[in-house]
Image (cartoon, helix red, strand yellow):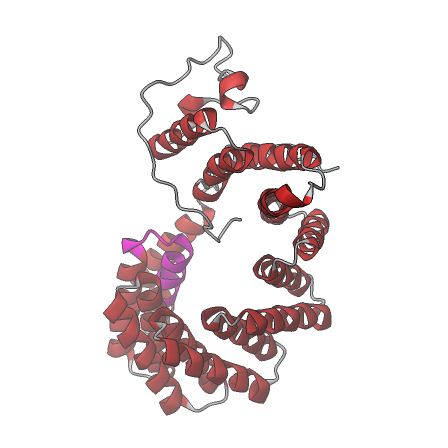
């Protein structure tokens, strides 16, 4: 499923690629999907497709075939590519499952193993449909697909998949402002993570619940869950998670007026982010520290940290962060009545915000 790389494939260099048709579309018999133009793919995605298809066409077992195609789905972010192969995975598993009826006792274990694997891929495909529709802004279809995914996972008692579905159903309800329902699903996710015993995911579940409570203004409960998450992340050595927890706890303390404690947590977050080279975390911490110094009237330090934040965001081409940093620097110059400099940074921020988003064609995904 998107955001969860489930299978790692050794990529084989493709020795031959099928020629495209006169309409620039590839041969469906080989490539399995309609309306695919290789010339529009990145070099890495073309290599990915060719490598996986080579494995697919050499495979003798259904599970190997679907695994090969699902690798395209999981490793490509091109919305004109992976949804096509995700539709193929859904149709293939849906059709193929009927070929595995209940077997005589001697073959039951093997058949059940194959059915479980195919059923899991079917549930993953439904989950990915949910992700696709969410990115397209269709919350109703996204929730419908996530619920279908959840049901499919429940049928094979695949708890990790169920938990993933709970998170995303909760997230969509949260975006729609239905907070009680969102919290309900987030707690269902937590229960399953605790049953699985995955400490990293338990810590993440604590963090999610802390975040939604913070947004609802329940600061004591938010801090309780943030600290639970931090303690578990410290225990398992999840440094990226620790940096995130320190940052969020710092933000809560700042909102409560405890500036010295907020600054302490922001610096802890920055230190860890620098240790692991996590640029986005570095940029966010620099920005947050800069905001505190601005509020305290220490303009030179505020500018220093805002520029550090901008540099880190530029290094990873994080457009939203860059725009925010330019705006913050502009605000300081504005407050200092340095209007030419303020306008310079405001214009840079506006230029990024107004840059056109890449347009993608919507691929029709049909679910029976």
Q: Is residue 238 left or right of residue 362?
A: left
Q: Which of 141 and 92 is in front in this view?
A: 92
Check the image and report above or below for 20 versus 361.
Answer: above
Q: Nearer the viewer, residue 323 or 159?
A: 159
Residue 176 position in % (x across, y down)? 69, 61
Residue 194 position in % (x across, y down)? 56, 74
Which residue is located at x 34 percent, y 75 percent? 237
Residue 285 position in % (x across, y down)? 34, 72
Tell me if residue 321 is in the magenta stretch.
Answer: yes
Which residue is located at x 25 percent, y 69 percent? 274
Q: Is residue 56 left or right of residue 264?
A: right
Q: Can residue 335 be seen in this view?
A: yes
Which residue is located at x 49 percent, y 8 percent? 22
Q: Residue furthest right?
A: 368
Q: Which residue lies furthest to the front in this view?
A: 106
Tell me if residue 158 is in the magenta stretch.
Answer: no
Residues shaded magenta: 314-328
Check the image and report above or below for 82 versus 247.
Answer: above
Q: Is the magenta stretch mostly helix, strand or loop?
A: helix
Q: Nearer the viewer, residue 7 or 104?
A: 104
Q: Is residue 296 visible?
A: no
| Displayed quadrant of residue 312 | bottom left
Residue 259 position in % (x across, y down)? 40, 89
Which residue is located at x 36 percent, y 69 percent? 240
Q: Which of 60 and 193 is in front in this view?
A: 60
Task: Quarter of the image for the C terminus: give it.
Answer: top right
Q: In this view, does 255 lie to the left or right of 130?
A: left
């Amino acid at each position: 499923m998107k955001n969860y790389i489930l299978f790692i494939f050794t990529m084989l260099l493709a020795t031959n690629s099928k020629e495209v048709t006169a309409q620039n579309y590839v041969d469906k018999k080989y490539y399995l999907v309609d309306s695919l133009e290789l010339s529009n793919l990145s070099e890495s995605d073309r290599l990915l497709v060719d490598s996986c298809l080579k494995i697919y066409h050499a495979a003798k077992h259904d599970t190997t075939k679907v695994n090969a195609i699902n690798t395209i789905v999981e490793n490509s972010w091109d919305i004109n590519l992976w949804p096509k192969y995700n539709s193929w995975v859904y149709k293939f598993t849906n059709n193929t499952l009927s070929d595995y009826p209940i077997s005589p006792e001697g073959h039951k274990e093997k058949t059940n193993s194959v059915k479980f694997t195919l059923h899991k891929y079917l549930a993953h495909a439904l989950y990915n449909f949910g992700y696709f529709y969410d990115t397209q802004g269709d919350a109703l279809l996204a929730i419908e697909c996530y619920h279908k995914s959840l049901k499919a996972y429940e049928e094979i008692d695949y708890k990790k998949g169920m938990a993933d579905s709970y998170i995303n159903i909760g997230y969509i309800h949260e975006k729609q402002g239905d907070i009680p329902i969102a919290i309900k699903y987030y707690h269902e996710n937590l229960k399953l993570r605790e049953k699985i015993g995955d400490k990293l995911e338990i810590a993440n579940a604590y963090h999610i619940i802390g975040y939604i409570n913070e947004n609802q203004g329940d600061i004591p409960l938010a801090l309780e869950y943030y600290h639970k998450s931090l303690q578990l992340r410290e225990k398992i050595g999840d440094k990226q998670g620790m940096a995130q927890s320190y940052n969020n706890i710092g933000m809560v303390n700042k909102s409560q007026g405890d500036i010295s404690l907020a600054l302490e947590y922001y610096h802890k977050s920055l230190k860890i982010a620098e240790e692991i080279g996590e640029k986005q975390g570095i940029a966010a911490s620099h920005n947050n520290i800069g905001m505190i110094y601005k509020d305290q009237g220490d303009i030179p330090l505020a500018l220093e940290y805002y520029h550090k934040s901008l540099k880190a965001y530029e290094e990873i081409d994080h457009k939203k962060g860059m725009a925010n940093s330019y705006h913050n620097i502009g605000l300081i110059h504005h407050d200092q009545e340095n209007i030419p400099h303020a306008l310079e940074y405001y214009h840079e921020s506006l230029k990024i915000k107004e840059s056109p988003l890449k347009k993608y064609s919507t691929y029709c995904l049909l679910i029976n």
